[in-house]
Amino acid sequence: MPTYAAPLEDIRFLLNDVHDVSQLSKLPGFEEATADVIDAVLTEGARFCEEVLFPLNQPGDAIGCTYENGMVHTPPGFREAYKQYAEGGWTGIAASSEFGGQGLPEAVRFVMEEMLCSANLSFSMYPGLSHGAYNALMSHGSDELKERFLPKLIDGSWAGTMCLTEAHAGTDLGIITTRAVPAGDGAYQISGQKIFISAGEQDLTENILHLVLAKLPDAPSGTKGISMFLVPKFLPTEDGKPGTRNTVTCGSIEHKMGIKGSATCVLNFDNAKGWMVGEAHKGMRAMFVMMNGARLAVGMQGLGLAEVAYQNALSYAKERLQGRSLTGPKNPGAPADPIIVHPDVRKGLMRMKAFNEGMRALAYWVGILIDVEHRHPDAAKREEAVDLVALMTPVIKAFLTDKGFDNTNIALQTLGGHGYIREYGVEQYVRDARIAQIYEGTNAVQALDLVGRKLPMEGGRLVRRFFEMIKSDLERWSTDDQFTDMTKSLGDALYKLQKATMLLAERAFANPDEAGAAATEYLHLMGYTAVGWQWLRMAEVASRKLAEGGDGSDRKFLGAKLKTARFYFSRLLPETATLLTAIQSGAAPIMSMGVEEF
Ligand SMILES: Cc1cc2nc3c(=O)[nH]c(=O)nc-3n(C[C@H](O)[C@H](O)[C@H](O)COP(=O)(O)OP(=O)(O)OC[C@H]3O[C@@H](n4cnc5c(N)ncnc54)[C@H](O)[C@@H]3O)c2cc1C
C-alpha cells in the first residue's frame, strides 16, 4: 500500500527561510496572513490531505466515475470528503472575503494545491476548476454575476467548469462552432457540443456553473470572435437556489488512462440559457485568466505526483533487499543489501529529489509573486511581478509536468516489477501524471507561448529581468569559495540560455519554423536554469543556517539540502548542453523531409 506524508519540513524551509513568506503580511489586505497563520493553515491542510483524501485515491482509481442516464457518480467517499473540504473553508481559501472567502494569499493555495495533487489528483480537479471559474468571474464578470454566483463558488455548494474543447477544436480554439444567440432579455441561448470537460457533471455539488466559449452570430472568424458565457446546470431562483434545469446535459464520460476519479464529460448545450462574461468577442481574454491560473495549477499536479511517487520509491529502496553493494556488504546480517546501496538506484532517487525540491522552490517563488502582482503598493514591484509570472507560467506548466512525469516513471523503475503492479500504487501515479503534459494547452503549446509571445513581449523586458536576477545572485555568491562550483555551473547554464535567446531572436524573424523547432528545448533550458537558480538560493540558506548551529534533525535536513544542490549542479544542470546543441542545429533537420518521405 502506498503512503504519503506532506513534505512540511521542506515547505517550511522554503516559505520561511528561502522565500520569506512573512513579506505577504505586509501587503494590503493580507495583514493577518502572518507566517504563523500560514503555517497553521498548511499544517491542517496537510492533515486533511493525508488522512481524508489520500485513502480515497487508490480506490478512486480502481472504481472510477460511473455514468448513468446523464448523471455521474464520483468514486465512493468523494462526496463525504468534498463536504468536509467545503465545510472546512478550503473552497474559498484564497477567495475574496467580500464574497465570503478566507482572503488568504494565493501562495497558500499554491502550496495546498501541491499537497492535494499528491494525495488525490482526481479529487483536486473538482475544487481546482471551481477556483479557476471564480478567478475568471472575479476579474471579468459583471457586478450582478459576481454577486449572484461568487458566494456559491466560494462556499463550495456550486462548482465550476471550463468548456473550451470541441471534437474538432482542441489547440485551435479559433475554429469552435458552439453558437450563442441573444435571447432578447440580456441572456443568450448556447448550442453546441463540448468534449473532455473535467467535472462537467458530478454528484458533489447542488449546481454546476459552466464557463463556455462560443461565437455570436456576427462574430469575426478565429479567436478574435470568441465570447465567454456562464451557463448554469440549474438556473438560479430569485433567492439563489438551484431552480429550473437548464438544457445542458452530459452525454457520456470518457474511459481513460488515468485520473479515473475525475469525470471527463461530453456536454451537450441545446439552446441552454447563459450570460455573457466580459465583452463580446473578447472571451479569450476572460478565459485566459482561468487558463493562466489553471496552467500553474497543472504544474503543481506534476510536482505533487512526483513527490508522492518519490516518497514511495524511497521507502521501497530502503527496504527491498537485492544484491550486494559494489563496495562490500552494507547489511551483512541479512541475505542481501537494500537496493538503495546501488549507485543506479540512488541516481534515480537523487534525480527525483533534486528536481522535486528545486521545482517546489521555483513554484512557491511564483506563488508569492502572484500576490505581489495583485497587491503590492509599489507599481514598479507589481510590474516586475507581472512580467515574471507571465514568463514563468509556461515554464511551470510544461517543465514541472514533463519532469514530474519522468519522476513518476523513475519511481516505478525503482520498484522493479512491483512498480508495475497495481497494489503498490506507483503505476497509478505514472498514469495520472501523463495527462498533465496534455491538457491546459499541450506542453508543445506552452513552449510556443514562451518563445513566440513571452520572449518578444515588452521588447524582451520579461526575459531580461529574469536574467538580471540570476546574474545579480551569481555576482553575490561567486566570491564565496563554498559556492564556486555551483555558481560556475549556473553561470554556464545562464550563458547557454542567453545564447539560445539571441539565436532565436536572430533566426525566428526570418523563419518562424526556427522558433517552433527550438521551442521545447528552449523551455527546458529555461526550466533547468530557473531550478538551478533556486538551488543556489537554497544552498546559500542551508549553508548559512548550518553555520548558525541548529539541532540534529535540522542539521540532517540542511546537510541533505547542500548535497542535493551539489548533485543538481554536477549531474543535472549539465544536461543543458544537449538542449543548446539541439537548438543550434536549427529547423532544417526537422523540416527538410517532405511529408511523403516519412
Ligand atoms: C482528461 C482530460 C481532461 C480535459 N479537461 C478539459 C476541460 O476541463 N476543459 C476543456 O475545454 N478541455 C479539456 N481537455 C481537453 C484538452 O485541453 C485538449 O485535449 C488539449 O488542449 C489538446 O487538444 P487536442 O486533444 O484536440 O489535441 P490537438 O490540438 O489535436 O493536438 C494534437 C497534437 O498536435 C500538437 N499541436 C496542435 N497544434 C499545434 C501547433 N499549433 N503547434 C505545435 N503543435 C501543435 C499538440 O501539441 C498535440 O501533440 C481535457 C482533455 C483530457 C484528455
Image (cartoon, rainbow, N blue to C red):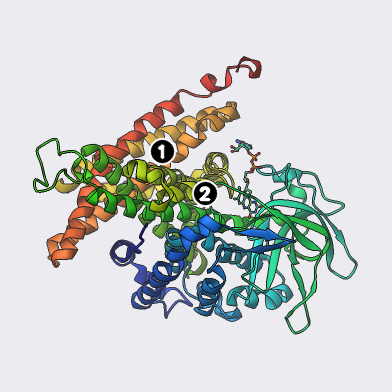
Q: Nearer the viewer, residue 573 or 308?
A: 308
Label 1 Cα neighbours within 10 Å, binned few <14 / some 14-19 / many ≥20: many
Camera-nearest label, 2 or 1: 2
**Eyeballing the image, is 211 above or below 422?**
below
2 or 1: tag closer to the N-terminus: 2
Q: Is residue 510 left or right of residue 493?
A: right
Residue named by callout 1: 525
Q: Secondary structure at mark 1?
A: helix
**Eyeballing the image, is 101 above or below 437?**
below
Quarter-wise, where is residue 75 in the image? Answer: bottom right
Residue type, numbered disc 1: Leu
Q: Is residue 302 left or right of residue 556?
A: right
Residue 79 placement (x, y as % from top left) = 57, 71
Q: Farthest top residue? A: 597
Q: Nearer the viewer, residue 104 or 375?
A: 104
Residue named by callout 2: 436
**Residue at left offset 44%, top offset 45%:** 405
Regarding residue 292, the answer to whether it shows in the image is: yes
Q: Nearer the viewer, residue 456 or 164?
A: 164
**Residue at left offset 42%, top offset 59%:** 118
Image quadrant in which the N terminus is located? bottom left
Residue 459 placement (x, y as % from top left) = 53, 44
Residue type, numbered disc 2: Ala
Between the C-alphas of marks 2 and 1, the distance is 20 Å
Q: Secondary structure at mark 2?
A: helix
